[in-house]
Amino acid sequence: MKKYFLVGVLVYSVFATSLSYAAQDVMPLSLKQCIDLALKNNVDVLLAQARAQQAQGQHTVWDADLLPQIDAVASQQRTWWENFGALGFAGVGVLGPFNTFDARIMVSQRILDFSALAHAQAGKMKWKASQLEIELASQQVVLATSLAYIQALGYAQELSSSYEDVRLADHFLSLSLHQMDAGLASSVDVARSRTQLAQQNARQEELRLNVIKSQLELKRLVRIPLSQPIELTDVLENQKHNYLTVDDAINQARQERMEMRVANANSDYTLTELKASQRQRLPKIDVVGEWGETGITPDHDAANAADAMVRISLPIWEGGRISGDIKEKAGLNEEQKIKADDLNWKIEEDVRLALATLVSTRAQVDAVKQVKDFARQELNLAQDRFTAGLGDNLQLIDAQDALADAKDKYVQTLAQYDQAQLNYFGALGNPRQFDLSNEGRE
């Protein structure tokens, strides 16, 4: 009895879970919606924003070195002194106690400090670079999300196409049985059709698993619950576009690529920091002023007190600290120059490869579309021959396999073409220009 009870509970749990999943609404998702969600929730973007906040704080700290510094200080002191001059029969004399009160407002202002001025400029440049890094992280999120969306879309369209292949295999099995009953086919033809149907079912399950895996990756990127069913509303694009020439594309990429702009901003920052280190050897001029009251207590014998001075300082010997700091900043600046030069080469490589890939994948789309059309014609001819009793169904099975492969290849090539377009816009520095348009679809 206990065994049947446990089985009943298990069945009920599975049934309730399936009902809950079925009742969950399917979320329609376009590419634009996925990008918006990813930009809002992606960890890399959030980390870049946190680094920008740190840079803004450092910028504020360095700017503060150029502003007046105001401090208020108050003290009440009670003092006893031993008076060795008052030695006598009573021992050491003690002077006091007596009180001392002092309250002042102190103001200091740097009049001339080239190093602090350069540091303030460097802080502004670092903050600017951090803003560019936010945009760079955003573009990388756009690229990753778009690639994941295209991949999931490709698998979904392959799975959708597989339903026709299963239906055709089932139809051809029925046709083989009918032909065998009419004496126009053998049991070998029927067995061959059953094998074909089983293979198409197995292929469909494999595609279904690919859809699940690709959608899970997409949902992780856009940060929606992994249990949430989704439906991709865009389709792969087969529209031809006009693109820039190689030279124009390279020039635009060098100006627009966010990596290049970040590298230039970091190079400006390290150069300004190097200047700040070099200027530590220059003289500094400060103005310092104080005003307040001093006396015995705040309400007894307190008098106004004030003083002001101009202070000039010049480092004479600092144990090599300034020299070491200059060498460090010079090395960092040289490192940024090397990275920027290498990035120039990388940008040109990306643009040339993106354009070459576009031309190649576009040609592959046109060629594979022809293969698909010819394979469908071949399947129709093979079906007519077998229906007329002109031979076995081997040609029919081969033709169906060729058509299924051609359809898969066509979808895969379309996905590669869309990825090539995305990489082209990414190489130019404008990945958000990529869109799965509703025009020119097949």
Image: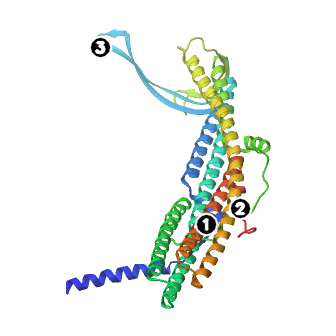
> Which quadrant is home to the C terminus?
bottom right
Find residue 188 and report its horizontal and vertical position in percent: 45, 79
Category of crowding for the residue at label 2, using alpha-carbon neighbours closer than 10 angstroms: few (below 14), some (14–19), many (at least 20): some
The amino acid on which the numbered mark 1 sits, given as a three-letter code, is: Ala
Instruction: Examine the rendering and report whether any part of residue 261 can be seen.
Output: no
Q: CA distance from mark 2 to mark 1?
A: 12 Å
Q: Are marks 3 and 1 in contact (CB under 8 Å)?
A: no
Q: CA distance from mark 2 to mark 3?
A: 117 Å
Q: Is residue 193 above or below residue 286?
A: below
Q: Which mark is residue 434?
A: none
In this rendering, the count of numbered labels is 3
Category of crowding for the residue at label 1, using alpha-carbon neighbours closer than 10 angstroms: few (below 14), some (14–19), many (at least 20): many
Pair 3/1: label in front: 1
Pair 2/3: label in front: 2
Q: CA distance from mark 3 to mark 1?
A: 117 Å
Q: Is residue 320 above or below residue 294?
A: above
Q: Is residue 129 left or right of residue 27?
A: right
Instruction: Examine the rendering and report whether any part of residue 59 can be seen.
Output: yes
Q: Residue at x 58, y 20 (%)?
A: 327
The amino acid on which the numbered mark 3 sits, given as a three-letter code, is: Ala
* Mark before the other along the chain sequence, 2 or 3: 3
Q: Is residue 39 above or below residue 230?
A: above
The amino acid on which the numbered mark 2 sits, given as a three-letter code, is: Asp
Q: Which mark is residue 406?
A: 1
The secondary structure type at the circle numbered 1 is helix
Q: Is residue 321 left or right of residue 31?
A: left
Q: Which residue is mark 2?
A: 366
Residue with the most extreme bottom position: 182
The secondary structure type at the circle numbered 2 is helix
* Mark before the other along the chain sequence, 3 or 1: 3
Q: Which residue is mark 3?
A: 90
Viewer-closest of 47 and 435: 435
